[in-house]
Image: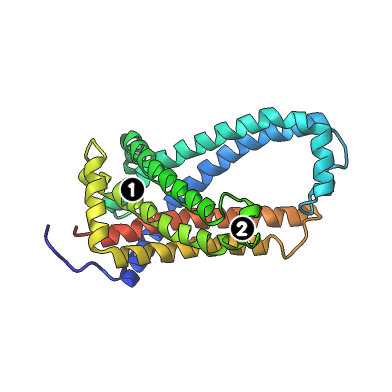
């Protein structure tokens, strides 16, 4: 394979941001589909709660924030109503996973082809064409994540001696070791995560039926240019974590006690959800810049 100088991280981010703005409709589609799915899940939940609680003020006590006493009272009085809702939640999570995979195929197709403006035909055609390949690719990397997670769980149990206080000189190690183990896990888990994103782009670039050529080619690229690829991914990951932290801070600096504050909280939540979807597009667009001549 011909050696070449890949673009700088700054250039990749700038061009990625340009594509994210140019194809802003992709972010809007993500947000709209996510909102529709959330409403489909929320309406049965609301109907069930109203049917069991009626006009009780118990729900009002939960609006300002987490309150264990009232939550415990609610579960004791109306806990049976939550069982079918929990089953439904699992189905919603599966549906959301499938929806994101479907949209990822279209997003990747648009980013790879780079039309002058967003093309609905290209987007929806790519979503349908690459759905099953994206599914197989995601299942493969989910298996890698499961193996990696199992290794870290084994390491945690090894360090804490099976969580047995009797075998430890200091019981505090059960929690203190998590301070370095969790950050280490995030840093290591980022590798298969970025590998997965590179493989998605190579899958669409090569338009191959099987996922293994894309997995192999993206793996070789990451090994060769690991520093830039990994650093770029960490920057985007840190931006995502910053958005989550900022969302948490914005929703805790004021108390939710009125209809106005509820609307403000809803607006902020939707804004941060939209930015997270835009970040997904930025990530793939930046990687596309890195892979432009590969």
Looking at this view, is 119 or 210 the one in front?
Answer: 210
Q: Quadrant of the N terminus?
A: bottom left
- Residue density around tag 1, few if under 14, some if 14–19, many if 20 or more, within 10 Å: many
Q: Is residue 120 visible?
A: no
Tell me where residue 179 sits by quadrant. Answer: bottom right
Return the x and y of residue 247 as percentages of the image width and height. Answer: 61, 60
56 horizontally vs 261: left or right: right
Return the x and y of residue 66 as percentages of the image width and height. Answer: 76, 52
Looking at this view, is 49 or 213 the one in front?
Answer: 213
User: Measuring 22% from the left and 50% from the top, which residue is drawn there?
Assistant: 217
- Which callout, 1 or 2, points to the residue nearer the camera? 2
Return the x and y of residue 118 as percentages of the image width and height. Answer: 36, 50
Tell me where residue 141 sits by quadrant. Answer: top left
- Residue density around tag 2, few if under 14, some if 14–19, many if 20 or more, within 10 Å: some
For the view shown, which residue lies furthest in the left direction? Answer: 2
Tell me where residue 126 sits by quadrant. Answer: top left
55 versus 160 height, above or below? above
Circle 1 sits on which residue? 108
Return the x and y of residue 246 as percentages of the image width and height. Answer: 60, 64
SS for tag 1? Answer: helix
Q: Is residue 257 visible?
A: yes
Circle 2 sits on which residue? 168
CA distance for labels 1 and 2: 50 Å
17 versus 137 height, above or below? below
Looking at this view, is 255 or 35 the one in front?
Answer: 255
97 horizontally vs 74: left or right: left
């Amino acid at each position: 394979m011909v050696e070449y100088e890949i673009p700088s991280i700054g250039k990749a981010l700038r061009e990625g941001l340009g594509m994210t703005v140019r194809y802003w409709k992709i972010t809007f589609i993500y947000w709209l589909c996510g909102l529709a799915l959330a409403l489909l899940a929320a309406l049965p939940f609301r109907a069930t709660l109203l049917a069991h609680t009626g006009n009780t003020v118990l729900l009002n006590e939960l609006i300002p924030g987490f309150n264990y006493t009232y939550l415990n009272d609610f579960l004791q009085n109306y806990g049976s109503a939550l069982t079918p809702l929990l089953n439904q939640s699992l189905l919603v999570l599966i549906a959301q996973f499938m929806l994101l995979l479907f949209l990822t195929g279209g997003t990747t197709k648009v980013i790879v082809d780079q039309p002058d403006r967003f093309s609905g035909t290209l987007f929806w055609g790519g979503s349908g064409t690459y759905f099953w390949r994206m599914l197989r690719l995601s299942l493969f990397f989910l298996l890698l994540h499961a193996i990696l997670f199992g290794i870290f769980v084994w390491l945690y149990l090894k360090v804490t001696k099976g969580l047995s206080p009797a075998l430890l000189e200091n019981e505090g190690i059960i929690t203190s070791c998590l301070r370095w183990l969790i950050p280490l896990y995030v840093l290591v888990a980022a590798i298969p995560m970025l590998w997965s994103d590179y493989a998605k782009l190579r899958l669409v670039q090569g338009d191959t039926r099987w996922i293994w050529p894309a997995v192999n080619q993206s793996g070789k690229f990451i090994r060769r240019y690991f520093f830039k690829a990994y650093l770029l991914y960490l920057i985007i990951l840190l931006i995502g974590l910053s958005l989550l932290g900022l969302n948490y801070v914005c929703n805790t600096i004021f108390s939710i006690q009125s209809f106005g504050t509820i609307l403000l909280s809803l607006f902020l939540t939707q804004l941060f959800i939209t930015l997270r979807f835009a970040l997904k597009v930025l990530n793939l667009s930046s990687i596309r810049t890195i892979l432009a001549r590969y």
